[in-house]
Image (tube, grey):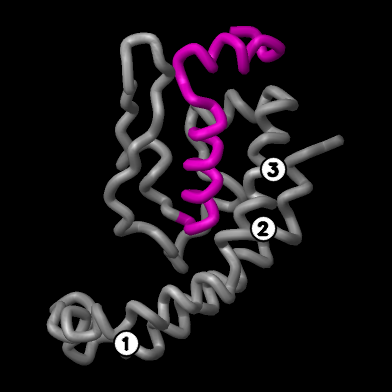
């Protein structure tokens, strides 16, 4: 498809708005394994566009690898060649950091759920059992979220040259 007709042509096959939301949120959580793997494309009917069904979030909130403002794959690289779809991505990121990916919202979710996983964490031979400190890891996650959010707030407009 030509860059100018990307929405009308690709939109027949892929729910562009939904894909952009998936890609933006996955980029925010720095899920390094999600852009070429760990999602299914699914059609609700023969004539409907594909939607993404994500799975396997074990590489989320990675502190040792940074994907930047977006994880690269052929779909998003092509979308960024079109002003409208690139602007949709920038708008989606802004919406997410102002409504869902906020420190207050995510810290609250973490605090409400940390006791549910504490015992399992402590007996996991790769995480607990003295290898990592649970409370320190919780604080590191909260710090990562705050810093990642601020990084997007400070830099997302650089994707939009207009």
Of residue 114 and residue 65, the one placed in the foreground of this image is 114
Figure disc tally: 3
Q: Which mark is residue 90?
A: 3
- From mark 2 to mark 1, how far is it between C-alphas? 27 Å
The magenta stretch is: 1-30
Give the left or right position of residue 21, taking residue 118 as reference: right
Quarter the N terminus occupies: top right
Q: Which mark is residue 152?
A: 2
Give the left or right position of residue 79, taking residue 61 as reference: right
Identified at 58% across, 29% down, the residue is: 77
User: What x and y, as percent, mark residue 62?
Assistant: 43, 64
Q: Which mark is residue 134?
A: 1
Quadrant in which residue 39 is drawn: top left
Q: Is residue 123 above or below residue 80?
A: below
Identified at 70% across, 43% down, the residue is: 91
Give the left or right position of residue 110, taking residue 134 as reference: right
User: Disc 2 on helix, strand or loop?
Assistant: helix
Q: Earlier in the sequence, mark 3 or mark 2?
A: 3
Give the left or right position of residue 95, taking residue 59 as reference: right
User: What x and y, as percent, mark residue 3?
Assistant: 67, 14
User: Disc 3 on helix, strand or loop?
Assistant: helix
Quadrant in which residue 35 is drawn: top left
User: What x and y, as percent, mark residue 84?
Assistant: 72, 26
């Amino acid at each position: 498809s030509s860059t100018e007709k990307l929405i009308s042509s690709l939109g027949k096959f892929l729910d562009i708005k939904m894909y952009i939301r998936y890609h933006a949120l996955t980029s925010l959580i720095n899920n390094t394994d999600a852009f070429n793997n760990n999602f299914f494309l699914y059609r609700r009917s023969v004539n409907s566009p594909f939607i993404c069904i994500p799975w396997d979030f074990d590489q989320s909130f990675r502190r040792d690898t940074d994907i930047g403002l977006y994880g690269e794959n052929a779909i998003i690289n092509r979308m960024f060649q079109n002003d409208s779809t690139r602007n949709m991505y920038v708008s989606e990121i802004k919406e997410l950091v102002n409504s869902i990916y906020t420190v207050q919202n995510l810290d609250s979710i973490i605090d409400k759920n940390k006791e549910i996983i504490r015992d399992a964490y402590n007996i996991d031979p790769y995480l607990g059992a003295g290898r990592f400190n649970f409370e320190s890891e919780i604080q590191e996650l909260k710090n990562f979220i705050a810093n990642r959010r601020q990084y997007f707030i400070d830099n997302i407009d650089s994707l939009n040259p207009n």
